[in-house]
Image (cartoon, rainbow, N blue to C red):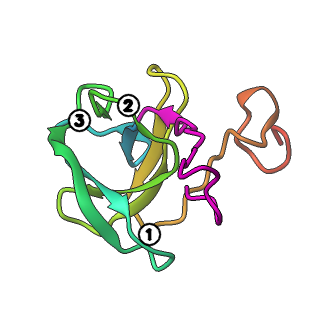
Amino acid sequence: MRVPVPHGGKVSAVLVPRPMAFLAVQVHFEGQPSLGRQVQFYKYADAKNNKGDSVGDVMTTDVDGVVRLPRLVATGHYVCEIDGQDHAVVSTVDRLKDTYPVYLPVDAEVVDLHAHAPDGDTTDEGGN
């Protein structure tokens, strides 16, 4: 950063480190973790969800459907492409053990029957 009128021919700056986080996703298909999916991360290019430069190598999901980039990245949004399908916009996570969930197919609506039912009851009338 330059000051408009440098004093004595000197310029000063303040360096602020960027917040860093982890890039990790868990891929689900039909409610189950999806093993063996090819995942590639990209920089988030613009508000139209276009992808930018790739981040890391292509990785394969493990038995839990998880892939983790083996290094820290700048906190924010990234594009995740799975098996060459439509890509999803994902967020970084603060802890290495956390993951961002991605449900296949990417554009499908996700309904969690257990989210609103008391004590695991999946009926509409509370067990009736």
Of residue 85 and residue 16, the one placed in the foreground of this image is 16
The percent position of residue 52, horizontal first and vertical second, equals 29, 66
* Residue at x 50% of width, y 26% of height: 98
* Residue at x 64% of width, y 52% of height: 7
User: Which residue in the protein does label 2 denote?
Assistant: 72
**Could you tell me which secondary element the residue under label 3 belongs to?**
loop
The percent position of residue 29, horizontal first and vertical second, equals 36, 48
The dominant secondary structure in magenta is loop
* Residue at x 44% of width, y 69% of height: 107
Mark 1 near mark 3, Cβ–Cβ under 8 Å? no
- Residue numbers of the magenta segment: 1-22
The percent position of residue 15, horizontal first and vertical second, equals 55, 38
What's the CA distance linking mark 3 and mark 2?
A: 19 Å
User: Is residue 12 toward the left or the right of residue 44 in the image?
Assistant: right
Earlier residue among tags 1 and 2? 2
User: Is residue 118 toward the left or the right of residue 92 in the image?
Assistant: right
**Label drawn at residue 107:** 1
Tell me: residue 41, above or below residue 120: below
Amino acid under label 1?
A: Asp
User: Which residue in the protein does label 3 denote?
Assistant: 61
- Per the image, is 3 magenta? yes
Amino acid under label 2?
A: Leu
